Image (cartoon, helix red, strand yellow):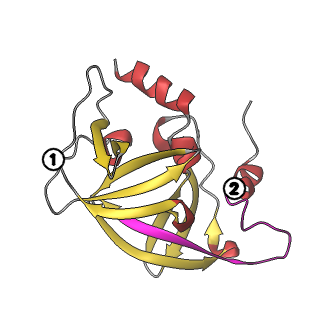
C-alpha cells in the first residue's frame, strides 16, 4: 500500500511538524559525484576522514566493511553504490559521516561534506510524483532548492530499514 505524497512528506520531518507552523530545521549536506544530498543534522554523531575497514564475508557490495570507532563496531556503507551509481574508490579525500538511525550507529561514505543548511519546513519540497519503490527513490524525503541547485534530503530510516537492506541484498545477488 503506498502512502499519499503529502503524508509521506509530512511524516519525513516529524520533529519539525509540531503544528506550530513553519519552523527551522538543519541538515548536513554532502556530495556524491556531482549530486548534493542532505541528512537531518540531529542524526549526525561525527564526521571523520576515510580509514580502511575490515571486510566481512558475504557482505553486500554497498557495505564496505566495519570500523572500530572507540570500541564501537560501526558498519560503513558506500552511498554511491547504495544509490546504484557504482562503487567508490575511497581515498583520504573521502569522508565518513557517522549517524545514529533507529538505535543503530552506521557510517556513510561520501565524497565531501558541503555545508550545514538551515531551512524552514516550508522550504522543503516534496519529491516529484514517481514510483517511490523503484531504485533509490524510496530513500528520498524532500528537496531543498538553493539558488540554481537542488539538495535531495534523504530519509535515513528508509535507507537503513532492515527489510529494505534485505531486499537490496537479494536484488544485488
Is 39 on the left or on the right of 102, as rendered?
A: left
User: Percent x, y for residue 70?
Assistant: 33, 53
Look at the magenta stretch and give its main secondary structure. Answer: loop
Is 136 on the left or on the right of 15, as rendered?
A: left
Q: Give the label, 1 or 2, closer to the camera.
A: 1
**Under tag 2, what secondary structure?**
helix
Comes first in the chain, label 1 or label 2 = 2
| Residue 152 belongs to the span the image colors magenta | no
Tell me the quadrant of the picture where the C terminus can be found. Answer: top left
Up the image or down, 38 lies above or below 128; here it is below
* Marking on residue 159: none
Query: Could you say which is closer to the camera, residue 166 or residue 125?
Result: 166
Q: Residue at x 25, y 21 (%)?
A: 57
Is 50 on the left or on the right of 75, as rendered?
A: left
**Under tag 1, what secondary structure?**
loop
Query: Could you say which is closer to the camera, residue 138 or residue 130?
Result: 138
Q: Residue tagged by mark 1?
A: 89
Q: Residue at x 72, y 68 (%)?
A: 16
Magenta range: 13-30
Q: Is residue 133 visible?
A: yes
User: Percent x, y for residue 69?
Assistant: 32, 51
Up the image or down, 33 lies above or below 132; here it is below
Up the image or down, 96 lies above or below 79; here it is below
Q: Residue at x 54, y 48 (%)?
A: 101
Q: Residue tagged by mark 2?
A: 9
Amino acid at each position: 500500500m503506498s502512502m499519499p505524497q503529502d503524508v509521506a512528506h509530512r511524516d519525513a520531518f516529524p520533529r519539525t511538524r509540531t503544528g506550530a507552523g513553519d519552523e527551522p530545521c538543519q541538515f548536513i549536506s554532502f556530495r556524491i559525484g556531482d549530486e548534493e544530498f542532505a541528512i537531518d543534522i540531529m542524526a549526525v554523531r561525527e564526521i571523520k576522514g576515510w580509514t580502511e575497514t575490515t571486510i566481512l564475508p558475504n557482505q553486500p557490495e554497498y557495505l564496505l566493511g566495519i570500523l572500530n570507532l572507540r570500541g564501537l563496531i560501526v558498519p560503513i556503507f558506500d552511498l554511491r553504490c547504495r544509490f546504484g551509481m557504482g562503487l567508490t574508490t575511497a581515498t583520504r579525500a573521502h569522508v565518513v559521516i557517522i549517524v545514529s538511525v533507529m538505535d543503530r550507529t552506521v557510517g556513510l561514505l561520501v565524497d565531501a561534506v558541503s555545508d550545514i543548511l538551515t531551512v524552514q519546513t516550508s522550504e522543503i519540497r516534496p519529491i516529484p510524483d514517481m514510483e517511490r519503490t523503484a531504485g533509490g527513490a524510496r530513500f528520498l524525503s524532500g528537496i531543498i532548492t538553493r539558488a540554481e541547485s537542488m539538495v535531495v534530503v534523504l530519509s535515513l530510516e528508509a535507507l537503513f530499514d532492515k527489510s529494505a537492506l534485505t531486499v537490496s541484498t537479494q536484488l544485488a545477488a
